[in-house]
Amino acid sequence: MNKFYLLVSKKWHTALCISLTAVLLGGCWDNRELNEIGITSGTAYDWNNNKWTITYQVINPLSSSGTMGSGGESNTPPFLTFTTQGASIMDAISHSNMTSVRQLFFAHSRMTVFSENLARKGITDVMDLFLRKPDARETVNVFISRRMGRDILDQLMQTSKNQGAGIQLMMQQEANLSSYYPGIRMFELAVNLASESHCATIPEIKLTGNEIMDSTQEIEVTDLPSRLELGSLAVLKNDRLIGWLSVKEAFGLTFLTNQIHSASISIPSDPKKGEVKDSSFSLLHSKTKVKPKWENDHFVMDVNVRGGGTLLQLSGDVDLNKSGEIEQLEQNINKEVLAYIQESWSALQKLNADATGFATLVHRKYPRRWKQIKAAESWDKEFRAIELRPHVSMKIERFGLGSKSFKSIENE
Amino acid sequence: MSTSQPGRASQSNNSGPESVPSSRPLMDSLEDNLSEMLRRLGASADIVVRRLDTEAGLPMAVVYIDGLINTDIINQSILQPLTNMFLQNEGKEAKGSTAEQLRARLLPIGQIQECKTFESAFSMLFEGHTLILMDGNKAVLSMDTTGWETRSINEPTSQAVVRGPKEGFTENLRTGTSLLRRKIKSPDLRIEEYKIGERTQTNIAMVYLKGITDDQILEEVRRRLNAIQTDAILESNYIEEFIQDGKWTPFPTIQNSERPDAVAAGILEGQVALLIDGTPFALLTPATFFSFFQSSEDYYQRYDVASFLRMIRILSFFVSMMLPALYIAITTFHQEMVPTPLLVSLAAQREGVPFPALVEALVMELTFDVLREAGVRMPRAIGPAVSIVGALVLGQAAVQAGLVSAAMVIVVSFTAICNFVIPSQVISNALRLIRFVMMIVAGVLGLFGITSFLMFLMIHMAGLSSVGVPYLSPVAPMTPRYLKDVFIRAPQVLLKIRPKLAAKQEAYRQAQISKTNPSHDSSNKGGQSP
C-alpha cells in the first residue's frame, strides 16, 4: 500500500515537474498585448547621403475608437509616421526603438516603398531583410517612389483610414480592372530577380501635387490638391533600377507576360477616317502564349494573344449588321493591341531588360543552348537580337442592344 | 389521544452513542412494546398513540405518525371497525387469533403486513403505515395508510420543451414509477426497489426493461447501489456521486432528467433509470458524452430541424468552451491571424484598458458567474434587477469606464448564451470549469496551449467510461452505424436499430420496412420481407 502510494506520488511529481517546465519554458515569452504593439501598415526605405532612412507608418488606434466613450470621432490622424536614420538598415531599425512607445509589429504591413535613390543603388539589402526577418511579411506590395519614400507614407488618403491597405487595394483594383500593370509583392519581386532574366518591374507610386496632405484638417475637403496615384513602371535589372516604362508601354508588357485580367481599349471605329479613337472595347479575358524558336542566328518569339470582350462604346457611322463591320472593328482592336506590344517591346529592348521573362522560356525550351548562353553570359546580346512576332486576335463577343451607334441613328 | 412521555424520551437521548439500532424482536406485552417504542421514538409531537383498552380484556393500541397518513383511512378503515368490534364484542366467538381475525375480516385495507421486530415496525411507521399493537401478540399489524401531501404533476421547469409532454416527475417515488409505467405498458418493465441511507432510508427504484438492458450493466448498477453505505440520501446527486465511474473528471457520466418521456426513451434504449424518493430528477446510466446533447424535443420535431439544432448545440459547446480562450490567445499571441481592420478596431478598444487580456477575461467571466449564481438564488420578484444590473452596470458602464473592452463583453456574453444552449445542466456546468482552465492555458501558451489542452481533454474523455460503456462512443470507438443519432437526428425510419451502448443486442425497434409505397400498397403493411 505504502509502496504503491510512493510510486504514484513519484509519478505525479515527475508529471508535475515536466508540465511546469513546459509551461515555464514555452510560456508567455512572446505575449504582447494589443495596446503594447504598434501595428505597422507600411514602411519606406530611402537612401540619402550614404545613410539609410526608414519610415514607419503606424496605425493610430485612437482615431478609430468611436465607442470608447470619449465622444465621437477624434481629430487624431488615422496613422502616425516616424523616421529613423542609420548607417545600416539594422542600425536604423534599432533606432526606431528609441522613438517609438510601442513595439513595432509588421505582420499587418501591406506595402513598402523604395525611393528611386535606393532602387538605383540596389535593393538587395532590403530584400534580404524582408526574407530573413521572422515577422516581416513577404506578401507586402512593393512600390517605387521618385520622391522620398516617407512623403508617400505621410500623405493621408480619403475613404481609407489605413493608408497602407488603401494603397494595396488601389493596386489590386487597378490590376483587376484596367490591367495596365500588375502589382508586385515582395516574394514575387524576389522570384523575378532571381529568375533567369534577373529583371523585375515595380509600379511607381506618386503624389499628384507637390503638397503633402499630412494633417487631418487638410483632408476635410472633397478634392485634395494632392493625392496618391499609381504612375509609371520601374524596370529593375539585377536589383538596380535601370529605367521606366510609361503606362502605355507597361500595358504592352502586361499583354506580353499574360497578366491581363480585364482592360478597356480605345479604338478608332473607322481607321480610314482618321485615327480618332472614338470607340472602346472592354477586354474581359485574354490569354498570351509565347513560343521561342531558334532561327538561324537569333531567337524568334511567337507571341499569340487571344482574347474576347464586349464592345462598350461605338461612334461613327457603323452598322454592325453589315457584313464585315465587326471584323473590321476586331482588326482595329488587334492593331491597337499590337501597337501596345510593339511599343513596349522596343522600350524594353532599348533598356535591354528582359522584364518579359523570355529567358525562362528559352531555358525551358532549349536547355542545352541556355547552358552555352549562360556560360558565355551572352543573354543580353541574345535578347537584343530577339525578333518578336506578335499575333493578336481579339473577338467582339457582345455588342449590346443596338447594332448602330446612337450617332448614326440620330442622323437618320 | 396522543400520549407523550417526556421522561422516557430523555432516557432514549442518553442511551449512548450507538445510533444504529440493532434488530430487536417484539415482546409479548402491549405495555412493554408500547413503552419501548415510545422510548425509541422520543417525545416527538407527531407520534400518535391511540389506546383501545376495553373491558373485554383485549388491550390494543393504534400507532401512527401524523402528517404521513391519510386521516380518512385511519378513521374509516381502522378505528371504526375496531371500535365496532368492541361494541359488538365479536372477538369471543371468532376462531383464530385476534390478529388473524382483524386481518381477515375487520380491516378493509389493501396492504396489511405483520412485523416481528421493532425495526421493521419503525420503518413501516415512517413510510406512513399505521401499526396495531395487541397485547399478547409478538407481532404488530402494519397497514398501508400512506397519504402525505405531495406536489401535483407539473411541467418540468429545468428541461422545458415547446412541443412534447408537459409532465414532470415529482418528489414522490411512486408517482415517478407510475409515470413510467404509463409510458411503457410492457410486462418487461421491471422496477426494483432499494432502501439506501442509514438514517434517511430513502427508497430508490431501479427501472429497466428486461430483455433489452444488458445484464452486465444491470448487475454492475445493482452492485454499485448495494455498495453504497451512507447516512443520508437526500437528492439524486448523492446517488450519482456514489455510483459514477470517474471521480476525477468534470464530465458527468450519468444523465439526469426531470422528464418521464426522456427517461422512458432512455429505458427503451437499454439505459437503467434510477428514481429517488424525494427528488424529481431521475438518473439514467450508462450515459455517453453525446447523450448530453440530445434533447427529448429532438424527436418531437422534424428531423431536419432537429439535426440542425443539434449541430448548433454541439457548435455552441465548442464556442462556449473556447471562445474566451481563443480571444485571449489571438489578441496576445497571434495578432497576425486577425484581419487588419478588425485588429485595428480591437486595438482601439483595448486602448486604455489597464489589464492584460487574460485578466480582463477572467474578471468578466467570474463576474458573469457571480451574476448567474445570483440570478438563480434570487427570489422571483427581484430576479430581473440582477439582469439589469448585470447588463447595464457591468456591461455598458464597465466599457465606458475603460475597465474592459467592448469586444470582451461581446465575447463573454456570447459564451454565456452558448452555454445556455446545451440542454443538459450538468455538462454546461462542467464547461464552466473547463473554460477557466482553457483561458489560463491560452493566456500562458496561446493557441499552442489551447491545442495541447484540447488534446489532453480528448485523451481524458476517451479514457472515461460509464458503467462499462466508453464515454465517447459511438465516435470513439467509431461505430458508423450508430452515428445516425449523434451529430444529427436521422429520420425515424432510419433509426431502426437500438444503439448497442447499453442494449443487450441491437434489436430492431421498427419493422424492417416501415415505409411502403402508397401507390402500390395503400394498406401499409409493415415488415414485408425485401
Image (cartoon, coloured by chain):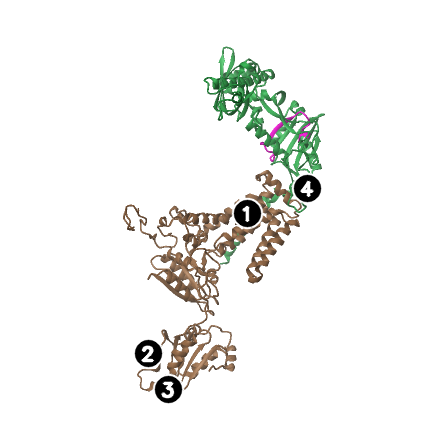
Chain colours: A green, B brown
Tell me if mark 2 has few (under 14), some (14-19) or many (20+) residues whose alpha carbon lies within 10 angstroms of its own.
few
Marked residue chain, label 2: B
Name the amino acid type tagged 1.
Leu
Identify the secondary structure beneath mark 1. Answer: helix
Q: Which residue is mark 3?
A: B87
Which portion, as a residue range, is magenta? A133-152
Q: Quadrant of residue A142?
A: top right
Name the amino acid type tagged 2.
Ala
Q: Is residue B383 above or below residue B412?
A: below
Q: Which residue is mark 4?
A: A74
Locate residue A170, reporting x and y percent.
60, 30
In whole angstroms, how far apart are the C-alphas of marks 3 and 1? 81 Å
Q: Is residue A231 above or below residue A69?
A: above
Name the amino acid type tagged 4.
Ser
Is B424 in front, or is B212?
B424
Q: Which residue is mark 2?
A: B104
Q: Earlier in the sequence, mark 2 or mark 1?
A: 2
In whole angstroms, how far apart are the C-alphas of marks 2 and 1? 71 Å
Identify the secondary structure beneath mark 4. Answer: loop
